[in-house]
Amino acid sequence: MRIPILYHDPDIIVVDKPVGVPTHAPDPGDPYPGDALRIVQAQVGLDYLGMHQRLDADTSGVLLFAARREANPALAAAFEGREVRKVYLALVHGAPRPAQGAIDAPIVRDRGGRYRVTAPGERQGKPAATRYRLLETSPDRRYSLLEIIPETGRSHQIRVHLAHIGLPVVGDLLYGPADRPAPRLCLHAYQLTLPHPTTGETVTFTAPRPTLFAGLGSGLPGVQLAGTGTHVRGAVRQPDALRELLRLAVERRAPLATDPATTIYRLVNAAADGLPGLTVDRYGDALVASLYDDDDRLPPRPMPEPLIALLAETAETIGARALYVKYRPKEAGRIAEDQVEMLAPPKPVWGPDLGEFVAVEAGLAYLIRPGEGLSVGLFGDMREGRARVRAWADGRRVLNCFAYTCGFGVAAAAGGAIRVLNLDLSKPALAWGQKNYRANGFEPDPYDFVYGDVFDWLARLAKRGDRFELVILDPPGFSRTRRRRFSAARDYGELAVLAAGCTAADGLLLACCNVAELPWPRFRDQVLAGLAGVGRAAEVAGVYHEPAVDFPAPAGTEPYLKMLLLRLG
């Protein structure tokens, strides 16, 4: 990922932090550099960055770092001495009366990661003061743009204070109306003014307004459409709103789009981007749009022509050359072979047929076949997982179960694994995986691409004493072979036990599950209970989910992808 740099000198770096990127890593042990601090560090090539302010992951805007340790004392003194002026922009529900004012209300921590204004007589609250000023309101006064100046720096202060006076921030899942979702949290750190740590001169840095914040004149049609929960098929009746939502989705993915080392990412994530029923994934020159309907009729209803036209327009904007469509059934694991071509037409609906081509992720090459079927060669929601495997694999023997086209295998090989054994029940997928190896300059050993039932192979490997320091489990939610039926929701504990039999002492087991209906606690408990039942001690070394930048969770839902890293005794 790349973050726009607003200013850089020997003492400070100022960036425009995107939505979905945390300021610093929530888990210090996570090897994936998905936080602003480490992303910027890699961009500018510095060994050190000092942090003096924080923004919530879903708040965009001005963020300052010290570029060298010598700048820290002066910056710390400025922030602690209240010599720093912060100005935010907030899109809110409603319109303030009066047009400007001050909110002086102590804040206390509440349950579930929330904060609240204290009740009369409550003494635990910390003093908090916020000033606001109306900049613009929509013609129907449903939405307003406010300038916000916090005079104190409490967690969630602006969001709590605005909700307290009846003006919740648009898209605020914690403090706003649950029935009026939006494509993003509409809070933006607009301006930062402070004395320069070396010269003492007053300097001001400004992050451009997000696109959404400039749409009040038209009444924010995209936000209004997103709040209705209208399926994308119905949304084509509002082309201006649909176009705005697609434009906002493109803006959100800018940190990925501007990184030449990664051309594989999700462009539209259904309801989270205000477009229920539609996902769009980018694979280099191709966009792959998936339609999810409530019915499983065959042949499926074709994608509406107005939607094709708008997606083609979006493709041209970002430099893609072709658009393919997939019609997703409720249970993709159970479709018959003769239905595949109806659900996944081999030819694009717009642009030239690209056949097989290379797209890249973190500098690694993957062969993509957008007309091949419902799965085109790589699952983008595992991007961060593959990066972590690349970091963990160095000097380890790796067992990659349910390998598909060996994305994890390629990442492990690139990370310096001693050996990577890929297991899968599809010979064509393993052959595809070998081509992925060759695309990255690795000569695949045929003995490391093993065809067969993973359950059988895990038992066989354990019996003959093969042990691996990193074992990866990434099964489908449901599968069926001649000998067994597997359901992740029911059978994951059994799978974890078999994998433990091949995991070396002090080795790592990465258990992944993408079944949204399986809650995180039950998934974790299944895995841990299975391991405890066979006497393997397991320490939870990491918990991960899908990437927040391009796979944000829809309002009111939990992340669907669960990745549990265990260190086995």
Image (tube, grey):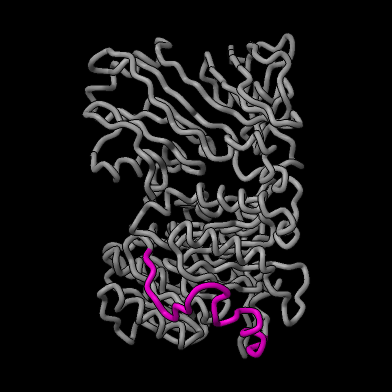
Check the image and report above or below for 172 versus 493: above
Q: Which residue is at the front of the view, 301 or 555?
A: 301
Q: How many labels does the image show?
A: 0
Q: Residue at x 36, y 53 (%)?
A: 259
Place of residue 548 in the rendered image (x, y in percent of width and height, measured from the top left): 52, 49
Q: Which residue is at the front of the view, 280 or 481?
A: 280
Give the side of residue 172 with respect to residue 549, left or right. right
Q: Does 341 lie within the magenta span?
A: yes
Q: Which residue is drawn at 74% across and 40% down?
A: 178
Location of residue 409 by image quarter: bottom left
Q: Which residue is at the front of the view, 5 or 83?
A: 5
Q: Quadrant of the C terminus?
A: bottom left
Place of residue 30 in the rendered image (x, y in percent of width and height, measured from the top left): 40, 48
Place of residue 130 in the rendered image (x, y in percent of width and height, measured from the top left): 59, 15
Viewer can see residue 133 = yes
Check the image and report above or below for 196 versus 501: above
Check the image and report above or below for 371 versus 8: below
Viewer can see residue 402 = no
Check the image and report above or below for 388 versus 345: above
Give the side of residue 273 with respect to residue 95, left or right. left
Place of residue 47 in the rendered image (x, y in percent of width and height, measured from the top left): 23, 39
Q: Which residue is drawn at 29% across and 27% down?
A: 12
Q: Which residue is drawn at 39% across and 68% down?
A: 359
Location of residue 462 by image quarter: bottom left
Location of residue 345 by image quarter: bottom right
Q: What stretch is highlighted in magenta?
A: 336-360
Q: Which residue is at the front of the view, 57 or 482?
A: 57
Q: Does 237 lie within the magenta span?
A: no
